[in-house]
Image (cartoon, rainbow, N blue to C red):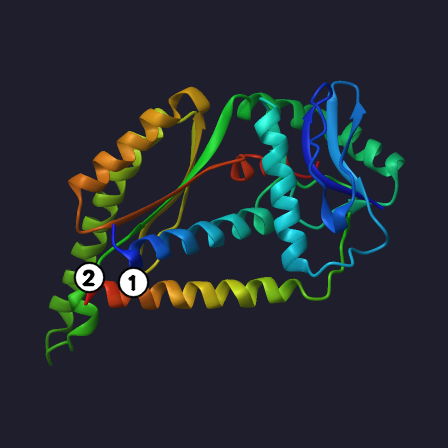
Amino acid sequence: MVYLYAIVDADAAAPTTRGIDGAPVAVETHEDLGAVVSVLAQQPSSDSQQAVLDHARVVEAVSRGSAAVLPARFGRAYEDADSLRRALEAGAGELRDALERVRGCVEVGLRVLAPERASVLSPVPAGSGRDYMRDRLATARQEKAVADELHLPLAALARASIRSTPTERLLLTAAYLVPRRSLAGFQTRVEELQQSRPDLTLACTGPWPPYSFAAEAARP
Amino acid sequence: MSVEGSTIGHEVALVELVDRVLNKGVVLSGDITLSVADVDLVYVGLRVLLASASTLDRLDGE
């Protein structure tokens, strides 16, 4: 079977790094599109944790050598080169658009962790249900305002951004598509925001290949 | 940054990486999904990481 790591321009060089199960990595082309692949036996023999890391390593190597890379989701393969070519043909328009969108960019991840809330730990005094609800609503509004205060200046520096729904302690989970030449400035801005809010934990990761911004070129 | 802080940073990065590889990225039509038996183990590993990260986080806050 033909295992897919990423979509690139047809003229992109194949990375010299080995893929899953130590298989060599090649670029199969269809018109102006390239598919970074390995030919594997029916199923990988390595355990899946190793295979996930191998997949990530190939995508990382490809993105160091190419300006535009669409990482593929883990664990997707094609029966043979023909079925891969048909898939490229069917998705060609969307893949080209997506390649242009991520060209020259990397992804930066951000998670903002709130301090543990006192209100969660302290018992609610009897008879204050209405006050409690009012406080909870006020807290939710404040958290939204804080998340905006952190997200909006970063989104302004990015070509695109994706913001996920906040959870209990994660005020903000976001991914930013940042041009490589703006990366240092973006990271400086994150540090400034951290300094302005020492009560919060800003966990900034990356630069990653643009995994989160490749998914939009989904199945036709 | 404290030792605890940098350990959290490393674990967060690993969680973020695995989350991206497994759940993001482009999916094309006509593919066959690998039936890797132990893919759940990756998630078990992740939960361990997340649990230890939140434990460190709590200790750090004390």
Q: Is residue A211 visible?
A: yes
User: At 25% across and 50% down in the image, what residue appears?
Assistant: B1
User: Within the image, what quadrant is residue A129 found in?
Assistant: bottom left
Chain name for mark 2 = A
Foreground mark, 1 or 2, reads: 1
Total marks shown come to 2
In the picture provided, is A134 more to the left or to the right than B32? left
Q: Is residue A149 visible?
A: no
Question: Tag 2: residue type?
Answer: Arg
Q: Which residue is mark 2?
A: A136
- Asked if A220 appears above or below A94 in the picture, the reply is below
Q: Dot 1 lies on which element?
A: helix
Q: Which residue is mark 1?
A: B57
User: At 74% across and 18% down in the image, what residue appears?
Assistant: A32
- Asked if A4 appears above or below A122 in the picture, the reply is above
Towards the viewer: A105 or A100: A105
Q: Position of residue A192 (x, y in %)?
A: 21, 34
Q: Position of residue A109 (x, y in %)?
A: 42, 41
Residue B8, numbered circle: none
User: At 60% across and 51% down in the image, what residue appears?
Assistant: B22
The lab-note entry on whether marks 1 and 2 share a chain reads no
Q: Position of residue B19 (x, y in %)?
A: 53, 51
Q: Quadrant of the C terminus of chain B?
A: bottom left
Q: Position of residue A56 (x, y in %)?
A: 61, 44
Question: Tag 1: residue type?
Answer: Asp
User: At 30% across and 59% down in the image, what residue appears?
Assistant: B4
Chain name for mark 1 = B
Q: Dot 2 lies on which element?
A: helix
Kindly report the distance in space between the C-alpha atoms of the residues bearing marks 1 and 2: 24 Å
